[in-house]
Image (cartoon, grey):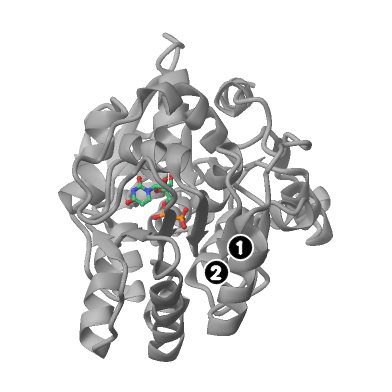
Amino acid sequence: MKILTIIGARPQFIKAAAVSREIAKHSEITEILVHTGQHYDTNMSDIFFEQMSIPKPQYHLDIAGLSHGAMTGRMLEKIEAVLLKERPDWVMVYGDTNSTLAGALAAAKLHIPVAHVEAGLRSFNMKMPEEINRILTDRISSLLLCPTSTAVQNLKLEGYDKIGSRVVICGDVMQDAVFFYSDKEQCPGDVMGIDLNEYFILATIHRAENTDDPARLSNIASALSEINHSIPVLLPLHPRTRAKLQEYGIELDATVIDPVGYLEMIYLLKRCRMVMSDSGGLQKEAYFFLKPCITLREETEWVELIHGGYNMLAGSDKTKIINSFHSMLNRSIVDQDNLYGGGDASSKIVVELLK
Ligand code: UDP
């Protein structure tokens, strides 16, 4: 069996690392990796391949830094050429980026079955590019690999039990990654101004709805700057956010460092007091490491974290963020729900592919 996996963005490298390791245990499966190039900086791409021992992609499409339409269109064209050459039995895509949609669409048009890892997630906010990508990808996938029962339920409500695609719950591959890598943490080196053995807040901001809106970005920066006066805030900053802060002239009084690798992130997650982020992946990782989390968005796909009291939605309103910070600061997180499976999502995925 030949599986062609399409990845291109940071969270996809992390998810694919877990699944590719499982695929490699099966001699009857050949995996071809295609990197679209969507994330290309060393610390947004190469570092994950090195740290997580992801095999070197057989194809690198070098498509980055374009508008959504141009990027998706070029990916579609180049992925189609690869698919015509390789003729895989499955195309596997992850999550909700332009690389996900382009990969799924190119495959579906060639009648190659698509397996979608992280199927069924919904924010119900159609302004998010990710929501558009995930809805369209789900619709043209043959195998919908859902991380949670909420995701299965979302698909059911959209009528997926009647359209002939296979919907399976398999848990979250990010849980697999944490189980495998959590004892391989790496200290990010000297972080000026913060003692990583003392209390600090780990924050990230990268989502377009925050970075592309000067008012939202300014409110978040102002809230983090104020919090930084009571507990140091450490912000490994996405290049897009750095550029936007500069473009809008927004001040941020926190310890800003370049994006770090996954093993450094694990080090920081283990030691931080709390996570504040608009990242999907980080919301779950905060829960895996039993840290309270504040989500800097109006809604989340990972609703079970909110219902379980592990996470609080604060949006971009400064007062709301600061109030949420105070109410979550001393909350002790005990996992009573095992929300994302037992760390065996990757092996369940491979079983489904082999069926
Ligand atoms: N991450 C990382 N280095 C960083 C920031 C994030 O390794 O400097 C990891 C994080 O631990 C998580 C993943 O990247 O595993 C989340 O990716 P991102 O926030 O870019 O995307 P999202 O999850 O929102 O789709």
Q: Quick one: 155 or 84, which is closer to the camera?
A: 155
Q: Is residue 111 above or below residue 295?
A: above
Pointer 2 residue: 132
Question: Can you give x and y, in whole percent of width and height, for residue 284 in the image?
Answer: 58, 46
Q: Answer yes or no: do the residues labelled 1 and 2 have beta carbons within 8 Å?
A: yes
Q: Quick one: 60 or 272, which is closer to the camera?
A: 272
Question: Can you give x and y, in whole percent of width and height, for residue 222 in the image?
Answer: 41, 82
Residue at 61% across / 73% down in the picture?
314
Residue lying farthest to the top in this orientation: 27
Q: Judge whether residue 334 can be spotted in this image.
A: yes
Please tell me whether mark 1 sits on a helix, a strand or a loop: helix
Q: Is mark 1 within 8 Å of ligand 1?
A: no
Please tell me whether mark 2 sits on a helix, a strand or a loop: helix
Instruction: Give the spatial CA distance, label 1 vs label 2.
Output: 5 Å
Mark 2 Cα-neighbour bin, 10 Å: few <14, some 14–19, many ≥20: some
Q: How many marks?
A: 2
Residue 336 placement: quadrant: top right
Say the numbered circle drawn on residue 135: 1
Point out the image quarter for the C terminus.
top right
Say the numbered circle drawn on residue 59: none
Residue type at tag 1: Ile
